[in-house]
Structure formats: C-alpha cells, structure tokens
Amino acid sequence: MAESEYSDVLIIGAGISGIGAAYRIHEKNPKLSYRVLERRARIGGTWDLHRYPGIRSDSDIFTLSYPFEPWTRPEYVADGPDIQAYLTETARKHGIDRHIRFNTRVMSADWDSATDTWTVQTEIAGGEPTTYRGRFLFFGSGYYNYDEPYVPDFPGINEFTGDVVHPQLWPESLDYTGKRVVVIGSGATAVSMIPSLSEKAAHVTMLQRSPSYLLSTPRINPAVQAFRRVLPRRAANAAILLFAKFLTVLVYGVARAAPRFSRRYIRSHAKSKLPADYPVDVHFNPRYDPWDQRLCVMVDDDFYEAIAAGGVDVVTDHIDHIDATGIVLRSGQRLDADVIVTATGIQLQALGGVALSIDGAEVKPQDRFVYKEHLLEDVPNAAWCVGYVNASWTLRADLTARAVAKLLAYMDSHGYTHAYPHLGDVPMPEKPAWNINAGYVQRALHALPKSGTRRPWNVRHNYVLDSIDHRFDRIEESMVFGRVDAKSTQTA
Ligand SMILES: Cc1cc2nc3c(=O)[nH]c(=O)nc-3n(C[C@H](O)[C@H](O)[C@H](O)COP(=O)(O)OP(=O)(O)OC[C@H]3O[C@@H](n4cnc5c(N)ncnc54)[C@H](O)[C@@H]3O)c2cc1C
C-alpha cells in the first residue's frame, strides 16, 4: 500500500472557507505545509454547485469576498459564476490551487493521540482510495449536504409528467422556454431565480405556504462608485468594505430593534412597486418579524417588476396533491405546470458528512459544545468553519481562519502538538446554535454541535461582538495544550 502523504494542515473543501483558510494559515505560518482536499472537480463550493438561472449572492459581495482580495467589479450583489471565477482567480493568484487535490472526498478522520495526527480516508472519483495524514484538520466543508437537497414528500409528485427539478441539482440541459413553471418555495433561491426564469418561461408561479419579507438592493450601489471616484484604490476598498459592514449591521440592527417600523417600511415599499390592486398583505406581509427568518433580497426590485410585468404570479396556499399536469391546492385551485421547481431548501450537514473519531471512538458533533464558534469541545486540532446566518458568510469565515492561523502559530512557538477546548465539569446551559426560525435549521438542530450560553461557548451570530472578541482574544482561555513526546499538558 502506498505511503500516506503528510501535511501540517489538512483543509477539507475549496469553497470560500477552505480557500480563505489556506490563505490565512499560510500568511501567518509560511513554514507549515497544507493540503486542500476537495470532492468536486472545481473551486467554488456553493458557487460551483448551484447552476440555476439567476444564481447570485443575496448578501453584498464586498463582505462576501475576502478582505485580502477586494472585489473590484462594480456590482453590489454578484452573480454565481462571477463569484466562482473570483474564488478560482484568488486561489491561483496566491498559489493555493497548487495545494488542492480535486475529486477527493473525505470519508473519515481519526485522531491518534499516540502520535497527535489525524488520519484521513478519502474516496477518489475514478481512482484508488487514498489516506492522508495531518496535524490539524480544518473543515471548510460548508454546512449542507451536497448530494441530497431537502425535498418534502409531496403526494402524487411521481404522477407528474413534466420536469421536476431542484435548484441544487439543476440540469444544464433543462429547456423551460415557453413553458409554465411553478416554483415551490419563497426563500432566497426562489426570489433570485424567478425574475430570471420569467425572461424565457411562458409564465412563472411562485407557490408559497406563507409570505416572506423582501428587501431590494441596487445592483450598482452609488456609494461604492463614489468611494472609487474620490479615493485611491486601497483606501476606496477599505472604505467600501467598512460601508458594506456598517450597512449589514444597520439593516439587521434596525429590523431587530424596531420590528414594527421595519414591517411598515417593507410593506409600503411593496405597495409602491406592485400594481395598485395587488394583495400585498396576502403575499408579502408575514406574521413573524423581520429577521425572525432570513430576509430575501431582490435586485433593483426585479421580483416586483416581474410581477408588475405580468410574467410572475404569487400564490399563497398549501399543496393538496400533485397530478399528471399540475398542482392541486387545498383551496381547490389548481396550477397547471410543465416544470415544477422544488426550491424547498437544503439539508444541514455537520463536518461535510465526515465520520470523525478519536482513537477509534466515534465523535458525534451534536454531543459537543462549540468553542469560539469554530472548535469542538474535547476534539484536538480540528476546526469547523461556519458563517453567519444574518450577515455574509465570509465575515465569520475570515475570523475563524485567522483564529486558527493564530492558534497554529501559538502551538508552533510553544512546541505544542495538540490543542483542544475543554469545558470540564462547568455546568453550561444549552441554546440552539443557529438561532433562526428557518425550516432548514429547525429540521437539523439535532445534527449540529451545541451552543452554550456563556463565552467562549456561546454561538451568537454577531459580527460586531465577534470582531471585538477576536481583537482581545486570550488564546489560552479554556484550552488544553500539550505535546506528543512529553505527553505533558497545560490547562488554562
Ligand atoms: C443557493 C445559496 C446561496 C447562498 N447565498 C449566500 C449569500 O448571498 N451570502 C452568504 O453569506 N452566504 C450565502 N450562502 C451560504 C454559502 O454557502 C456561503 O456563502 C459560502 O459559499 C459557504 O462557503 P464554504 O466554503 O464554507 O462552503 P461551501 O461553499 O459549501 O463549500 C464547501 C466545499 O467543501 C467541499 N466538501 C464538502 N464536504 C467534503 C468532503 N467530505 N470531502 C471533500 N470535500 C468536501 C464541497 O465540495 C465544497 O467545495 C448561500 C448558500 C446557498 C446554498
């Protein structure tokens, strides 16, 4: 059997998190070797996988791109293929692409405390399974199952004679020109896809069980253009990033602090953009407050414009069953369709589905508390990079990558070969790690690691507090460090 390759750091995934981690770890620890293991054939993760019409970011691209590689194009929200190209170019520019093994899916990782190393088993598309060894494991594996999106069991769906597609598995060959399309769901994916679908389809219906909040953002933000006109390039990039962060925090903060004001604002905006007799309160006035669930973003009011142009309908109702030619609703109404798009969401998955063990004993992520939002209780030398639900993923992913880079430098300078957070016997009340009432979160809370209620075990999705914490971080807090030869440990 071939000898397994060793790297100081093994990074799983070549999406935003994995590429960002490679950059930050190498920046602070240039002597450490690293390898990126990626199950797909290309860089990009989410932005490579999703190919549906209209795929774009719904948070601004300036906070979704890396602070070390500013977004230079004009748009404020970016199209999926442009994000994929940006990630590919970033990896190439910084030599990260040379460290990636593509088509390499990590199946399991076992920690050996006799040698302080991880042994990682992979499956190679069309090749022999390979083993990698490493000192530190960085999970940039995202947060959902790539193979199986979430599709509820709609009665009769197998009777339907048209095409049924899920956005996550969009067939490039699908031709919906001149067809009647029904999109089931009203989340970010449906809202970004529908204006685009309506350009070619005969008609598009968005079928939702209950309304969502829609906010509009300009594709080209005049403030960004103004910064670029008056400031030198580097200063403009810094100012734009600060502006985008400020706007993110402001919109979320206002929504939470003044929900009635936010509701009124969103509703009156809908009224002003939709036809005079449009039933805004039926389709766009949710029962919950803004940001109890994720807010959906339109670009330049494109969704409302598509409705006003007559190409798109919204129906708020429940599915009774599906038959050969369409969907029968509980109200008795039917929606005839040639194509049904099940924009019904993702399935959360911890650690890229990798089976984790320590000295052969299984580790269940859901049994462990999360430490400083990226390490797992009593799991040595491993981090899972998870972004925010209420702000751009990269704001958190970059904090995580920098925290891991710092931890590695600290371990190196002290000669430590392992480090893990330890709660011990301290009682720690639990709260949901993802405190948002979205279907995909509620369905999978049991599969996610636990959040405590006090730092450093508190997952709070708060960029402002996290960045302050990061600046004043005490690396030793609640950590156990040690080295393999001496087997001596130091608990802080
Ligand atoms: C449709 C959609 C739109 C989104 N829009 C936004 C947005 O506008 N703003 C925002 O902030 N967030 C958004 N998100 C969240 C989004 O996933 C993040 O923005 C970000 O792309 C996550 O990056 P990641 O690298 O952590 O994970 P991913 O992009 O999911 O990448 C994970 C990578 O790890 C690889 N991988 C996983 N498991 C394994 C394994 N076992 N072995 C080897 N490789 C593995 C995958 O192949 C993939 O390449 C969106 C998500 C979806 C699904």
Image (cartoon, grey):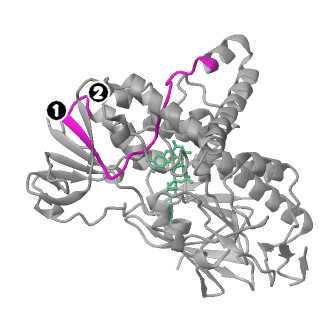
Where's the C terminus, which quadrant? Answer: bottom right
Q: Amino acid at mark 1?
A: Ala
Q: Amino acid at mark 2?
A: Asp
Q: Nearer the viewer, residue 226 or 113?
A: 226
Which residue is pictured at 85% across the width and 82% down the height?
485
Q: CA distance from mark 2 to mark 1?
A: 23 Å
What span is colored magenta in the figure? 198-223
Q: Nearer the viewer, residue 490 or 270?
A: 270
Label 1 environment density (alpha carbons within 10 Å; few <14, some 14–19, many ≥20): some
> What residue is disc 1 on?
202
Which residue is pictured at 50% across the width and 39% down the height?
58
83 left or right of 270 in image: right
Q: Nearer the viewer, residue 52 or 6?
A: 52
Q: Position of residue 399 (x, y in %)?
A: 73, 50
> What residue is disc 2 on?
277
Q: Position of residue 476 (x, y in %)?
A: 88, 67
Residue 323's disc number: none
Q: Is residue 466 above or below residue 91?
A: below
229 left or right of 480 in image: left
Residue 419 found in image quarter: bottom right
Residue 175 found in image quarter: top left
Q: Position of residue 259 (x, y in %)?
A: 58, 42
235 left or right of 133 in image: right
